[in-house]
Image: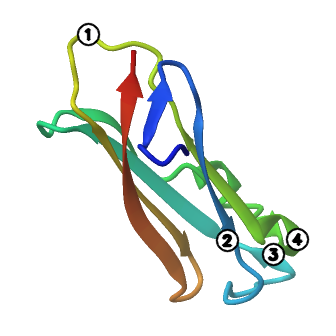
Amino acid sequence: MPADNSVALGQKLWVYFYVDSGWKIKNGRVFLGASEAMYTDDGETVIDEKDLFAKNDSSGLDLDHSKIIKLSSLIRSENRPVKYYKVMFRVWDKNGDAEIAGHYNFLIHH
């Protein structure tokens, strides 16, 4: 992301997590959850995804695939001027206590 935290409309933002240990392994698989929510500067909810990895609940992930986690955000259009967007994220181990959580803000430059 540029130093001023601004991106173009339609430009995808990525958050990468490199995890070399900490996930609990069950039957050779890792079971993760990931949530992501985005809000405007005045608190309007843009997205609120409770578990982006829910489709993997029964099969889990191969250990190698659980070492690099990628989450993305994208604003395709704006209905009104927004000062900034706040993205809150969380990745957690469904069989253990490990988790990564945080947030970032960004602006759309026009």
**Disc number at residue 31?**
2
Q: Position of residue 72 (x, y in %)?
A: 57, 42
In the picture, measured across the screen, residue 89 lies left or right of residue 16, that is: left
State the separation of the CA atoms marked 4 and 1.
41 Å
- Asked if marks 2 and 3 touch (Cβ < 8 Å), the reply is yes
Residue closer to the observer: 27 or 92: 92
Determine the secondary structure under disc 3: strand
State the separation of the CA atoms marked 2 and 1.
38 Å
**Residue visible at 55% across and 45% down in the picture:** 1
Residue closer to the observer: 92 or 12: 12
Q: Amino acid at mark 3?
A: Arg
Q: Position of residue 22 (x, y in %)?
A: 67, 89
Q: Determine whether 43 is above or below 27 in the image.
A: above
Marked residue nearer the N-terminal end (2 or 4) = 2
Structural crowding at the residue carrying mark 4, measured as other residues with C-alpha within 10 Å and reported as few (<14), some (14–19) or many (≥20): few
**Residue visible at 34% across and 42% down in the picture:** 38
**Residue visible at 39% across and 54% down in the picture:** 104
Q: Amino acid at mark 2?
A: Phe
On the image, numbered disc 4 is attached to which residue? 64
State the separation of the CA atoms marked 1 and 3.
43 Å
Marked residue nearer the N-terminal end (3 or 4) = 3
State the separation of the CA atoms marked 3 and 4.
9 Å
Residue closer to the observer: 12 or 58: 12
- Asked if marks 2 and 1 touch (Cβ < 8 Å), the reply is no
Structural crowding at the residue carrying mark 3, measured as other residues with C-alpha within 10 Å and reported as few (<14), some (14–19) or many (≥20): some
